[in-house]
Amino acid sequence: MRHDTSSSKKLSRWMRLSIATVTRTALVAGVAVAAPSIPSFPTAQAAETQSIPANADAYAASTQLDLSAPGVRALLTTDDPRGVDEILTLLEAEQSWISDSDDEQEPDLSNTELELLELLKLDIGGVEVPLIGPDGLLQGDLGALRAYANAPSDTHAKASVGLIGEDGALELGNAGDGGNAKLDLTKIANIDLTSVLLDEASLNLGTLSSLAEKNGTQLTSDYQIAEAEVVIDSPLVGDVVTEVEDLVRGLEGTLNGLLGQQSVLSEVFGLVNGLGALIGTGLNVSAEIPLDDIMSELVEEPLSDQNGLVSIDLINGQIRVDLEKLHAEGLNNLEANTELLTAQQLGQITDTVTSLLTDGAVENPNGLNARLQDILMGNGERGGLYGTEVQVQLRLLGPLAGLVLRTTLGGLLNENAEEADSVAEYDSDKYNYYLQETVGLGVIIGGLLDLVRPVLGAVGTVVEDLLFGDETQEGLVSGLLGSVQDGVLQPVLNRLDPLLVGVLNPVLGIIVNHQETVDGLFKVSALEVDVLSGTLLLPIANSAVISLDESVPPTTEPSEPTTEPSEPTTEPSEPTTEPSEPSTEPSEPNGSGFGSSNGGNGNNGSGGSMQQCLASPTVGLAALLSILGITAAVGGSAIDPSIKNLGTQFSDQVSKLTGSTPQNSPAWVNQLNASLAEAADALDSRVAATVLFGAGVLALFFGPELCGDSKEGLSSQLSS
């Protein structure tokens, strides 16, 4: 059952307090009136966000997205003819315990239907944003998620949502089965993608689940967050690769330019004195840097810090932040109402990104500079720039003969390198083989190759020194790394850093394991998301429960008077003088044993009867009926249960006092109950108000009939 207005909820609570007041009045009068059965927890404030039946003793509810909160509900729209409220009802599981007939009832278990959520939109600043979908606030697949609610007794309520079993328990070991929902941070922060260098900014959440259970006084809760990873896709990150590739490509041109200078190769000529007459000036050396291999290795794996907090995917232009690494206890063991990200942790993230992109190899061996340096330097004269293919051309006997040698820089430096029999053999291991080709009469001087081999070693040394430097000078690689740092990384970082802060700021408002208790209703949410800096709070994976601490057995017999009818406080006084005859008998105490005993202070006549009648519970009920008449015009159907329950309890009480049964009750009692039933069934609150006023007058009129001198006299009057 749902209450349509907040005024009816407040009225329901007021009515229950009014009934309690009348009950206390009846007890003061000396008669125990059985009060209508009402829950011991108030629901007025809790009902602002949760529709709890007013007469429920236990209640459980769960939903993946809590869209019923006033701040969220006011922004929801839909084009579906069923309307927002009906769609919200279909998305949740809820159950109440109202009477003994609800004992051990089966749980309400429903599937979260993505199609229903896709029907809803959020009106944010006049712009309608889909709640779920490719362009929505939430994206991705929610997976096999369900909602569970069970209230098997008045003291037990259990609710859960997410990846759960048939009994409502969280299935913590199978988080991957629940899909991979994600929040669009650009919509949460209202970031215009057209004005920033940003293709995507999202918070990947995986499966979100929660559980709340109250059994007597024991309250337990749990939650699950499969992951919490921020993904930032920016062309700035992809630009790093492009610019580094351009610098490495430029390195090849610089190297060949140096190798074309005779001064650079002068030492090579000096090593072949015996061959000089034959070689003449016919020596040419060229190099081809393995650019594709170097760049592939550079972007093959994302950059990642030692703790795994930040990873930078250079080839896809993405930065990923694993927020779980910020919490030593993990995501699923945090205290209630813990911030997913603090301002201090945000600074830790930006510092980590800066270090990965700009720190030197010594400061951060996991950074980009360290990786690029390692790739270029190779390992054991293999890989990287040692894979640079060098071609040495020798012209022998002038233009009549020539010899071409081709191998890698690593092969040039390998004294044990052998001539390959074929190109295929050379390609299989370019560090242990070299290729030799002869031109013209070059085949005649093949025996001179032992004299040529020192030339290869000398060329290798020259190329290595040019690339990596020696004791006297820095190499081309050092200059390349400096250019990458100053010309590429630092400018990119200067633009990337404020972008990171802007994207991560919305995450500062996300609360993990959000818990609150409002007027006894306990609620837990796996996450609560702050959208547009407080414009609305969106709880995700919500479970709520409330129940009695102790079971209250139904009252079947009226309570006995709290005190025995009191005896007269004094003996009848003797006359101070001898009267001819006493004018009256000593007065008896007023009342019939159910009212107050006044003894010698009581008054006979109409004054005493009025005082006794005013103490009657009937008068209290009559006053309540009059008040109900006033409130009926305001509350309408909200007071129906109270009216019907009150009529039943009043009829039972009169039956106890008179010894009658509902079948032979006095006509005026039956008329009063009929009036109450008619008021409860009235469709028009004004008709209900009129009938209630009439019932109040009727009860007042017959109130004096309950003011007899004895229980027997009272029964006689009521029976008539």
Image: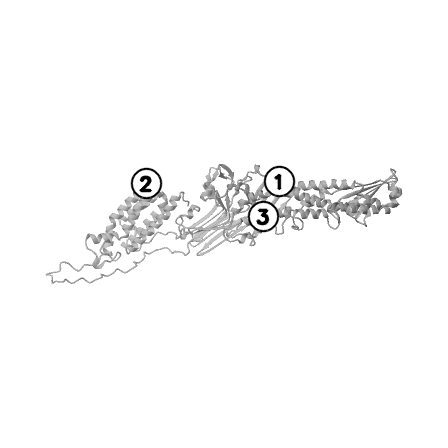
Question: How many discs mark residues in the rendered view?
Answer: 3
Tell me the tag on residue 235: 1
Looking at the image, residue 83 sits to the left or right of residue 196; the answer is: left
* 223 or 407, nearer to the observer: 407
Q: Position of residue 606 (x, y in %)?
A: 20, 52
C-beta proximity under 8 Å, tags 3 and 2: no
Structural distance between the alpha carbons of marks 2 and 1: 68 Å
Q: Which amino acid does label 2 sit on?
A: Arg
Indicate which disc, 3 or 2, sits on the residue closer to the N terminus.
Answer: 3
Q: Which amino acid does label 3 sit on?
A: Ile
Q: Which amino acid does label 1 sit on?
A: Pro
Q: Can the viewer see residue 720?
A: no
Residue holding disc 2: 686
Looking at the image, residue 142 sits to the left or right of residue 665; the answer is: right
Structural distance between the alpha carbons of marks 3 and 2: 65 Å
Tell me the tag on residue 538: none
Residue located 26% across and 48% down the image: 700
Residue holding disc 3: 349
- The relative height of residue 599 versus residue 542 in the rendered view (above or below) is below
Q: Where is residue 306 in the image (x, y as percent from the top left)?
A: 63, 51
* 366 or 655, nearer to the observer: 366
Q: How crowded is mark 1: few (under 14 residues within 10 Å), some or many (20 or more)?
A: some
Q: Residues within 10 Å of mark 3 (few under 14, many from 20)?
A: many
Indicate which disc, 2 or 1, sits on the residue closer to the N terminus.
Answer: 1
